């Protein structure tokens, strides 16, 4: 009786030691404005010894602050959040930590959201309606291989690659509309979207649309390369951009 | 005497002519005034309509968004937690399974309702993608065949995109509910001066004379058309199908 108890304790200690040595837990972070969901996921993942949730954030800013202190292996990220949404957050984080593995967790199932998040650098995209095993598998695969594709992601990616409406072809700037040229001028002057919107009496969203069209049409990735492109190709003269160059 | 008579006639004639001229000028002015007043009234009506539609859309978006994100997330969490319940007792197991089923069903319903209220794809990715998504959902949900073709649409405000989206929703709903069609074609084209939306079906069609007496659906289309300053043509041949074209000028 006595010996068996000791044996039991020893064996437990050994398994614990083996576990903690053989499996370094995957460090996770979660960002979601929805507290209930966040805690549901945390509670669920607690049951697995191979996961260690180190950051719980309810906004992009909170996450960025926490990342400055310590970095997880994988971030579980909601797309729809007030203030900074998941897409913007994803961009910001990958700029700061290019190796960070992000898994999008969203209520949205439309191909566009999936394709867009993957294009931004997410490693997987899961519906919030996912079951426990699916979530565990996704996290483990992303940790091991760097990505995890469901059939749904595959479908969205295929459509994204093939569809003419999602992927816009590279163009050389001659096809810019007068409005886009106008917006381009303002962008080159270093004005923000809201300033441009106020200047042109259009909504911020429309400005964002124009900006995206400009990026797509010129094949550039940000405002700086867009400005360089505009000067290089003679789309705008240095006078037009206000002599900053 | 003769001269006086002649002079008198001249004076009367002159007076008569001036009265006529005055009258004509006055009438013209009155008419111009009326036309101006009418156009101001018309513009005011349109603005009133626009703002009431905008308010309605805002409310819809808010409700749809809250449903989708708040309630949807909560239900998903509940499902996730219920999935962790494991029972050896078959009776309880059965109960848990029923709860799971109800949750899944509710989540699906919620998605459909919120899609109707709040086209999230449209607000994030624009009209063409929004319609593409609507069509893909409809294709799965109904036995009809939908085709959708579109140019890249630029230069529309969000409210205008939403209005066109609502028009398509309404027309497609009509086609599904009333036309008995097997095919619906949606097309969105952009030229230099206008954007043209057309929705065709091969259903039973209707008498276009009766179209004016339509229900809330057609009224809502009419209101949005008015707001967009668009023209609308309805062509329908009973027994062969309906084609509705909405054309709006782009600045």
Image: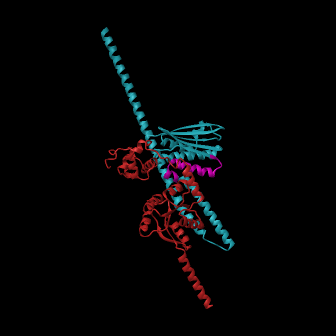
Chain colours: A red, B cyan
Residue placed most toward the observer, B115 or A44:
A44
Quarter of the figure with the N terminus of chain A: bottom right
Q: Quadrant of residue A176?
A: top left
Residue placed most toward the observer, B137 or B30:
B137
Q: Quadrant of residue B100?
A: bottom right
Q: How many marks?
A: 0
- Examine the structure image and report whether residue B137 is included in the region drawn in magenta: yes
Residue A197 can be seen in this image? no
- Examine the structure image and report whether residue B151 is included in the region drawn in magenta: no
Residue A3 can be seen in this image? yes
Extreme-right residue of the structure: B90
Extreme-bottom residue of the structure: A2
Side of B71 relative to A213 (left or right): right
- Above or below: residue B247 compared with residue A10: above
> What residue is rendered at 43% in x and 60% in y?
A95
Q: List x then y, in percent, for residue A39.
A: 52, 69
Tell me which segment is drawn in magenta: B120-145
Side of A229 relative to B201 (left or right): left
- Above or below: residue B73 compared with residue B132: below
Residue placed most toward the observer, A146 or A131:
A146
Q: List x then y, in percent, for residue B36.
A: 41, 35
Q: Quadrant of residue B216?
A: top right
Q: List x then y, in percent, for residue B73.
A: 54, 63
User: Please, what is the dominant secondary structure of the magenta stretch?
Assistant: helix
Residue placed most toward the observer, A139 or B17:
A139
- Above or below: residue B200 compared with residue B25: below
Q: List x then y, in percent, for residue B114.
A: 55, 55
């Amino acid at each position: 009786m006595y010996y068996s108890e000791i044996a039991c304790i020893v064996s437990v200690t050994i398994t614990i030691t083996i576990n903690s040595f053989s499996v370094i837990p995957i460090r996770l972070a979660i960002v979601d404005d929805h507290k209930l969901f966040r805690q549901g996921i945390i509670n669920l993942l607690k049951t697995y010894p191979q996961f260690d949730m180190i950051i719980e954030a309810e906004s992009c800013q909170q996450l960025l602050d926490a990342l400055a202190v310590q970095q997880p292996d994988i971030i579980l990220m909601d797309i729809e959040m007030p203030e900074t949404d998941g897409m913007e957050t994803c961009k910001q984080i990958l700029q700061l930590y290019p190796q960070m593995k992000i898994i999008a967790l969203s209520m949205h199932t439309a191909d566009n959201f999936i394709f867009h998040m993957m294009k931004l650098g997410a490693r997987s995209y899961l519906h919030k309606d996912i079951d426990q095993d699916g979530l565990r598998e996704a996290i483990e695969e992303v940790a091991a291989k760097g990505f995890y594709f469901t059939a749904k992601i595959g479908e969205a990616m295929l459509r994204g690659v093939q569809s003419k409406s999602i992927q816009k072809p590279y163009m050389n700037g001659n096809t810019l509309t007068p409005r886009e040229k106008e917006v381009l001028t303002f962008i080159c002057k270093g004005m923000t979207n809201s300033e441009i919107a106020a200047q042109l009496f259009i909504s911020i969203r429309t400005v964002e649309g124009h900006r995206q069209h400009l990026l797509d049409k010129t094949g550039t990735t940000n405002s700086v390369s867009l400005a360089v492109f505009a000067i290089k190709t003679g789309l705008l003269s240095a006078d037009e951009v206000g002599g900053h160059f | 005497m003769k001269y006086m008579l002649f002079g008198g006639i001249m004076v009367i004639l002159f007076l008569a002519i001036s009265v006529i001229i005055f009258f004509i000028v006055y009438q013209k002015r009155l008419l111009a005034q009326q036309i101006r007043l009418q156009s101001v009234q018309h513009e005011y009506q349109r603005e009133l309509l626009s703002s009431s539609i905008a308010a309605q859309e805002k409310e819809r978006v808010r409700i749809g968004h809250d449903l989708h994100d708040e309630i949807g997330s909560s239900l998903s969490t509940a499902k996730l937690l219920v999935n962790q319940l494991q029972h050896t007792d078959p009776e309880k197991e059965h109960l848990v399974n029923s709860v799971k089923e109800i949750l899944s069903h509710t989540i699906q319903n919620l998605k459909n309702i919120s899609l109707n209220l709040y086209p999230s794809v449209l607000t994030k990715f624009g009209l063409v993608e929004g319609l593409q998504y609507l069509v893909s959902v409809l294709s799965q949900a109904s036995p009809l065949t939908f085709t959708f073709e579109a140019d890249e649409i630029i230069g529309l405000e969000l409210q205008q995109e939403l209005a066109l989206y609502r028009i398509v929703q309404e027309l497609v709903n009509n086609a599904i509910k009333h036309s008995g069609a097997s095919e619906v074609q949606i097309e969105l084209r952009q030229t230099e001066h206008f954007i043209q939306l057309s929705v065709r079906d091969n259903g039973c069609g209707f008498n276009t004379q009766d179209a004016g007496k339509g229900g809330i659906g057609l009224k809502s289309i009419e209101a949005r058309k008015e707001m967009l300053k668009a023209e609308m043509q309805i062509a329908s041949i009973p027994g062969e199908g309906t084609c509705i074209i909405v054309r709006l000028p782009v600045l």
